[in-house]
Amino acid sequence: MKKDDKQSLVVRNQTVVNFTKVQLNVTKKLIKKEAKEWIIQAQKCIEKVDYPGAIDACMKALTIEPENAVAFRYSGIARMLIGDVADALEDFEQALRILPDDIITYKERGFLYYELKNYEQAISDFSKIITIDSTHVEAWYSRAYTKYDLQDYQGAIEDFTQTIELAPNHVEAWYNRGYTKFDLKDYRGAAADLTKAIQLHPDDLNFYASRGEARYHLGHLRDAITDFNLIIQAEPAAANAWYNRGVAYADLLNYTPALHDLERALELEHPGAKTAIEAIKPLVKTIQ
């Protein structure tokens, strides 16, 4: 009986141990689920522009799982959006320490560096994303945009081109590549890219304005006037379009409509209109 009692005790103790292990596993699963729910709550708070609520939810998740990279990332995003730059960067750093290849964190930190005008660091983060995933369209586009602000126009064009190769209908890439080509005085290339942007998004007046200027510099004055006409019809208070059309008419020696457009530009407070009018008025009198 004593031997049997001892065996029974061993069996009973083992049963207790196994039950405890099961309970611990269940508890761990419940804890992980709870942390995940706090992260979901943080995401919802960010969508509702409740950034303090998002930070609080992330802190609760991190209390449960101190090495949760997603919680650090969302905390960083929320802090970034309320202007708490130093703590946002610290949270992003922690997220990347845990998940060194987390593309989303690199992207958000890159955006923050860009807003801080720390373009070199922004480019570094966008480049890291491209190293991890060479097909990441947003990283190529964001790096191109940042290179433009650094006046690395050729580098920007290369990255905009890669964006277009990956996403042929990326209208912003077409527009900004055209804009960059314009800055490099490649007016023919600029006009071609801007035409493609217009095909993809025919309602954006900025596209017509930029193409009109490119056409003007190419000497395609009537085509430029056509673009400025479209802008004026859609937005009669567009001072720059009145001015540019007036200048184009003057170059065509059509001084009367040129003067009319420049006077309208002056009414709309265009800074160059007065000087242009003074130059054209004597010419109008000459042909009368």
Image (tube, grey):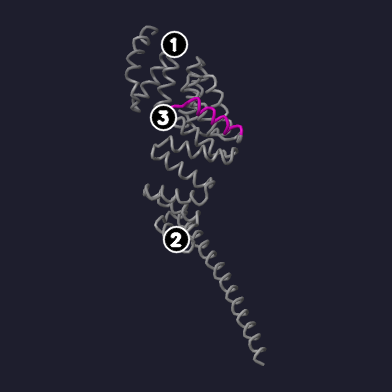
In magenta, the rendered stretch is 151-165
* Whole-percent x, y for residue 184 in the image: 47, 21
Residue bearing the label numbered 3: 238
The Cα–Cα distance between marks 2 and 1, rounded to whole angstroms, is 68 Å
Numbered marks: total: 3
Location of the N terminus (image quadrant):
bottom right
Q: Amino acid at mark 1?
A: Leu
Residue at image x 63%, y 82%? 10
Residue toward you, 130 or 50: 130
- Of all residues shown, which one is farthest toward the top? 286
Whether 183 is drawn above or below 135: the answer is above
* Whole-percent x, y for residue 90 in the image: 41, 49
| Mark 1 vs 3: CB contact within 8 A | no
Assign a secondary structure to mark 3: loop
Q: Earlier in the sequence, mark 2 or mark 1?
A: 2
Nearest to the eye among marks 2 and 3: give it. 2
* Whole-percent x, y for residue 56 in the image: 41, 60
Magenta stretch contains residue 147? no
Residue bearing the label numbered 2: 57
Residue bearing the label numbered 1: 253
**Drawn side of residue 87 relative to residue 190, left or right:** left
Residue at image x 50%, y 37%? 142
By secondary structure, the bulk of the magenta-drawn segment is best described as helix
Q: Earlier in the sequence, mark 2 or mark 3?
A: 2
Assign a secondary structure to mark 2: helix
* Whole-percent x, y for residue 125 in the image: 48, 40
Q: Amino acid at mark 2?
A: Ala
